[in-house]
Amino acid sequence: MASYHTRSISLPSTSHPITTQFDEQLCRLRSSQAASTSSSLSLTHRLTGLTELYVVVDEMLQLPSNQQSLSQIQVVLDGSLRVHACSTSRDVLQQSKQRLQDIQSVLRRRCSGELNITSEVAEYLKARKTIKKVIKKCLKNIKSEKADASDFFMNDVEEITIDIFRSLLSYISGTKSHSKKSWSLVSKLINKSSEKEESAAQTSEFDVVDVTLESIVCQKKTRVNIDGIRNQMVNLESEIEQLDEILECLFRHLVKTRSTLLNILSN
């Protein structure tokens, strides 16, 4: 569960409607982040909420009183970390999607239960290792970054943004290792849709695909459930596309906010 510091946000002395809206959205987002599990559905909900928060932030930054407060802060988080975290998230999602499509292409060409997708699987797993290293580095950078000491409201925005991206990147990275128990679970998920639905909230599609492909390599399987693997690929690709669609919109807002911050600071 995430914890947040309580700050006295530097807002106009005279209450403004957009200020109230900002407080309400920030509060809802914090509650959602603290209570939600790391599932695709909850992450989608939080990323959508974060995008909506930045719509309000853009309006907040247009208030003269906030611009004056910002201009007086000598050290401020300009938003580069937020933009980088979002960009990294989109990059690793696209890399995963590309490797998934390579395997799907082979599956479409071969209808027999006897097939060799070892090469494509190896490339996917190699890409996943690279992705996990990139994510680990990004998470390390996030952890080492310290918020500005001022009470300006953008520090609260930075805090919740980074916390959500930390959850997203950890979700994409998946578990560190996969046990025999995990292989057994995935085997059941491939063949029994009811069990898949029951376990969906606890097992990410990234982990499901990772475990399945690792089992093919480690157990040297030549005969596999093509329909089961194909369904897993479709589910994960759909999940990636959904997350990336939201991230694309959020990225535009992050860039716009950063540009506005830099313009205010330069004037």
Image: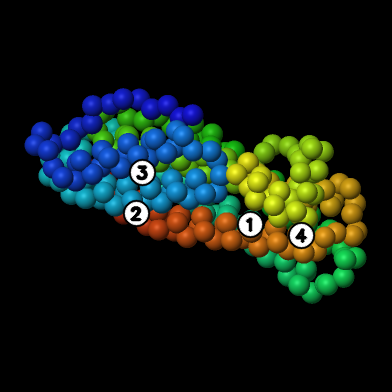
Sequence-first disc among 3 and 1: 3
Of circles 1 and 4, which is in front? Answer: 4
Dot 2 amino acid type: His
Furthest residue toward left? 14
Q: Which element carries disc 4, helix, strand or loop?
A: helix
Sequence-first disc among 2 and 1: 1
Q: Are marks 3 and 1 in contact (CB under 8 Å)?
A: no
Of circles 3 and 1, which is in front? Answer: 1
Q: Are marks 1 and 4 in contact (CB under 8 Å)?
A: no
Dot 3 amino acid type: Gly
* Picture coordinates of residue 227, whole percent (x, y): 77, 64
Q: Which element carries disc 1, helix, strand or loop?
A: helix
Residue 107 appears in the rendering = yes
Say which mark, if any, is on residue 156.
Answer: none
Q: How is the image coloured?
A: rainbow
Near mark 2 (Cα within 10 A), the count class, few <14, some 14-19 or many ≥20, is many
Sequence-first disc among 2 and 4: 4
Say which mark, if any, is on residue 228.
Answer: 4
Sequence-first disc among 1 and 4: 4
Task: Determine which residue is flagged by label 3.
Answer: 79
Identify which residue, 150 or 247, lies in the foreground: 247
- Residue at image point 29% right, 32% down: 75
Of circles 2 and 3, which is in front? Answer: 2
Q: Which element carries disc 3, helix, strand or loop?
A: loop
- Residue 262 vs 222, above or below: the answer is above
Sequence-first disc among 2 and 3: 3
- Residue 132 vs 6, above or below: the answer is below
Q: Quadrant of residue 174?
A: top right
Task: Determine which residue is flagged by label 2.
Answer: 253
130 horizontally vs 222: left or right: left
